[in-house]
Image (tube, rainbow, N blue to C red):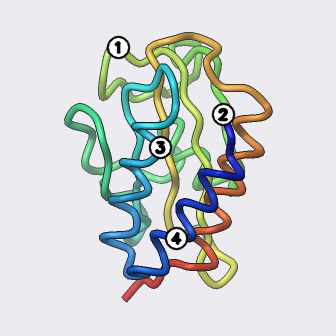
Amino acid sequence: MDYDLLCAQLESLAEAERWYVPLLSNAAALLYDELEAVNWAGFYLLRGDRLVLGPFQGKVACIHIPMGRGVCGTAAQRDATLLVPDVHAFAGHIACDSASNSEIVVPIHRDGKVAAVLDIDSPVKNRFTEADRVGLEAFAGVLEREMEIK
C-alpha cells in the first residue's frame, strides 16, 4: 500500500472541506476502497467518557464504546496505536461483526488529547503490519493537522 499517496489524497480532500463530518466520511471511503482485505473502516469520536460511532464504511457497527473496552476503547485510553493480529485473543474484544479477525486502531488528537480513533477491521488474521501502523499513523496525522471539529 502506498500510504504517501493515501495521505496526499486525504490532504486534497481536506482542501475541499475541513469540517470533520465530510472529511472523515471521505477518509473512511478512501481507506475502505484502497486497502485490501478490510471489512470495516471508520472512526469513533470521543464524547464524554465514551467513544461514539462516526463516519464509516462497512456493516452496521457498535454505537457506543466505553473508554478502556475493546480494541478501540483501549487504544483511546492508552493513547496508543493497537495492532491486533487476532481479535478473538484480545481480552475484552467487542464483536460488532463476527467476520472480523484482526484490527488496527489509531488515536487521533485535538489539542494534545485523544479526540477520536481510526478503526480498521479485517476478516483475515494477521492482516495488519508494522508498515500499516506507520502509514495509518501518518494518515491520522493528516487529519490532526487538517480537520476542523466544531
Position of residue 39 relative to residue 137, above or below, is: above
- The amino acid type, in three-letter code, at marker 4 is Ser
In the structure shown, which secondary structural element does the residue marked by tag 4 occupy? Answer: helix
In the structure shown, which secondary structural element does the residue marked by tag 2 occupy? Answer: loop
Question: In the rendered image, which residue does mark 1 sit on?
Answer: 99
- Choose the circle earlier in sequence order: 1 or 4: 4
Other residues around mark 2 within 10 Å, as few (<14) / some (14–19) / many (≥20): few
Question: In the rendered image, which residue does mark 3 sit on?
Answer: 31
- CB within 8 Å, label 1 to label 4: no
* C-alpha separation, residue under disc 1 versus residue under disc 3: 18 Å
* C-alpha separation, residue under disc 2 versus residue under disc 3: 11 Å
Question: In the rendered image, which residue does mark 2 sit on?
Answer: 1
- Choose the circle earlier in sequence order: 1 or 3: 3
- Choose the circle earlier in sequence order: 4 or 2: 2
Of the 4 image quadrants, the one containing the C terminus is bottom left
Residue 99 shown left or right of residue 70 in the figure: left
Q: Residue at x 67, y 32 (%)?
A: 83
Q: Residue 82, percent across and down?
A: 67, 38
- CB within 8 Å, label 2 to label 1: no
